Image (spheres, helix red, strand yellow):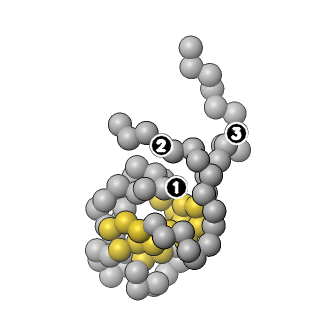
Amino acid sequence: MKRISTTRRTSGANLGLMAKTGSHCPANGFWRPEDRSGNPVFVFEGSIMPVSGSGSTVWYLEDAVLGAPAYLVPHRA
């Protein structure tokens, strides 16, 4: 299983991350298709990048959402 990174990333147009449809998502966040059609889609790190309305595409990270969860994570013994 892929290990999910918990490092902090910044938001903005210059994040520089991209992923193709069918590949694993490199970071949690909102992704927009290359043709900029529709609203951004939230994809979890490690998930398979989805197909856009126009089919296979290259996705660009628009806003990374990382850091500690907003809820308590149960402790594993």
Under mark 3, the amino acid is: Tyr
Asked if the residue at tag 1 contacts the one at tag 2, i.e. Cβ–Cβ closer than 8 Å, the answer is: yes
Q: Position of residue 42 (x, y in %)?
A: 52, 62
* Crowd class of label 2 (few under 14; some 14 to 19; many from 20; radius 10 Å): few
Q: Quadrant of residue 51?
A: bottom left
Q: Amino acid at mark 1?
A: Asn
Q: Secondary structure at mark 1?
A: loop
Alpha-carbon distance for marks 2 and 1? 9 Å
Instruction: Kindly identify the residue that appears in the image at 71 percent across and 44 percent down.
Output: 70
Single out the mark in the foreground, 3 or 1.
1
Residue beneath disc 3: 71
Q: Are marks 3 and 1 in contact (CB under 8 Å)?
A: no
* Percent of width and height locating residue 43: 47, 59
Name which residue lies at 64% across and 31% down. Answer: 73
Disc 1 designates what residue? Answer: 28
- The three-letter amino acid code for the residue at tag 2 is Ile
Q: Residue 4, labelled with which disc?
A: 2
